[in-house]
Amino acid sequence: MRILVLYGSQTGTAQDVAEHIWRESRQWGFEGPVLSLQDYNIQQLVEERLVIFVVATTGDGTEPDNMKQAWRFLLKRSLPSNSLTGLQFACLGLGDSSYSKFNYAAKKLHKRLLNLGATSLCPLGLCDDQHDYGHLGTSLAWAASLWETLSSTLAVHKKENPVDVKMWNVRVLEQPPALDEEQRLQWTQSQTPQLFKLIENVRTTAADHFQDVHLLRLQGIGSETTTWQPGDVLDVQPQNSAQIVQEFFDLLQEHQLPFDANTWIEVTSAHEDLPLPLPYATSLTLEQAARHIWDLTAKPRQRFLEVLAQNCEDELEREKLLEFCTAEGLDDLIAYVNRPRRTLLELLQDFRHATSKLTLSQLFEMMPLIQMRSFSIASDVSAGTLDLLVAIVNYKTIMHTPRLGLCSNWLKQLPPGVELRALIKSGTMSWPKEPQTPLIIIGPGTGIAPFRSIIQHRLQQQQTGVSIGKIEVFFGCRNKDKDYHFATDFEAWKAEQNIKVHVAFSRDQENKVYVQHLIKERGSHLAKLIREQNAYVYVAGSSNNMPKAVREAFIEALDNDANYVDQLMKQRRYQEETWA
């Protein structure tokens, strides 16, 4: 019996969950592929009978990039309300309840499928990243319930001795191919990138400040004109550091495994209906895989643990790895992997017997792929350079060495003059059509990045004779002399008639002052701008406490009318772009 598993994934987690469900479906005797919604012809959905959707929510309640095209098709008004009457489906959402539009993409998809006549097999599953177990707190029980439902309705049964379902075939090449794939591997996405030259890469925070933040200035290379709109983002594909790659091959050498950095490999799909990932489109060396394709700094996911256990001859290690993959072992998994943010390389070093039995095929089966990272563009096209403001991820846990973010630390070490491939992409923010519409902007920390772009854009419009509306800018940081990002810009903006700058230096006085306090002080003025001049409100920055505190400050300013703020959000006159 055919089952189709479709996913919309931005960071790879939803894809990982979808592939896990797909492997389980094989143990229940089902056939059919697991595909991103981008790789599936959505017009064929009318012919399907059984589909599982796994969908993440990104940004301000938006669907992932590889779901957008399919979602646009499903929203067509011309689709009859009985289009999908022959379809039975189940939908699992991956989200984060610290965001106001929690699991929005999955909720919208579930509702739309019902509107088109499809039948839901089980309740919509809503995974929450804030759960102690992360998405596993919901996904494991939801999947178990799904198979139970299918077992009773379709009379299917789980195989008594299920075998592991591998996705890829791996073959060692005796002769290296003539083509050099190094350049291709620097960009392994389906979209065509643009080439940029790094003009400047400087630290913007004080040397003794705990947070390292870098400003990178890029210029487009080539005949194409580099252009973007305020609020757009730049996608970059990072690489593992030389140190991490060396640690990986030292580990292989230590266990005397029969492959090394110079081993040439060809990867093919183990299933006719399963497309090969683009990074594996041509043959490559193990060194290229370790540098450009595999995320060696990632936390090990359940698939990694399952595969690592397969050949393990040490009973204690094998039992522990398999226990991590069960609902009963989740507490131990969280304590061992999630809380200390243990990397997969560190886990391989701990499970020495299992690591000593690894095969090449298993490595390609278990290793997570490096995902693109998105950064808000912090300049207008009129500025002449494409600027990024990047907070370098570097923090301590109980582990011996600091935890380093893959992409930010890769960007940090890039020297001026280097060329890199990147993709300009539309952001989640939408601006009012009329430049005369007032803007209220709240961007503490690196949250100021997208707003520097729109402010520069409006000032450029003003220079060409266009009348622009008032802009109220709220920025917050710890100290004026340590992390005052774009201080020169702020000082220049203070001289502009249409811009009012409000800055909270939270640690420069005895009582901590944050952006929400400044909003409350200006409450009546801001309420007038919103009610009488149709001002738009934009919030960007950390998703911890700031967005909620700012929202509450606006509710207070607007006569404690929470419904009015909700209405502003629905009208896209109050927008948030936050990140964990």
Image: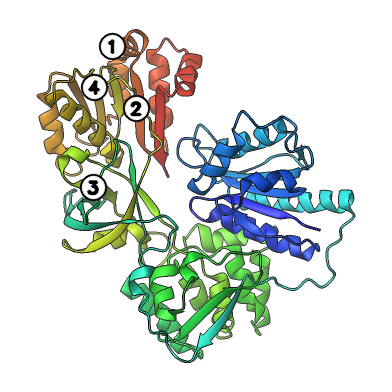
**Disc on the earlier residue, 2 or 4:** 2
Q: Position of residue 13 (x, y in %)?
A: 54, 54
Q: Which residue is mark 2?
A: 431
User: Is label 4 or label 1 in front?
Assistant: 4
Could you tell me how far apart the alpha carbons at marks 2 and 1 are, in whole angstroms?
A: 21 Å
Q: Which three-letter amino acid code belongs to the residue tagged 1? A: His
Q: Residue at (50%, 31%) from the top-left corner?
A: 100
Q: Quadrant of residue 106?
A: top right
As displayed, is residue 6 above or below residue 299? above
As displayed, is residue 401 above or below residue 379? below
Tell me the SS state at disc 1: helix
**Disc on the earlier residue, 3 or 4:** 3
Could you tell me how far apart the alpha carbons at marks 2 and 4 are, in whole angstroms?
A: 13 Å
Task: Confirm or deny contact between disc 3 and disc 1 (CB under 8 A).
Answer: no
Q: Which residue is mark 1?
A: 525
Tell me the SS state at disc 2: loop
Inspect this view and state whether residue 355 appears.
no
Q: Residue at (29%, 35%) from the top-left corner?
A: 230
Q: Which residue is mark 3?
A: 225
Q: Which residue is mark 4?
A: 471
Q: Position of residue 234 (x, y in %)?
A: 33, 48
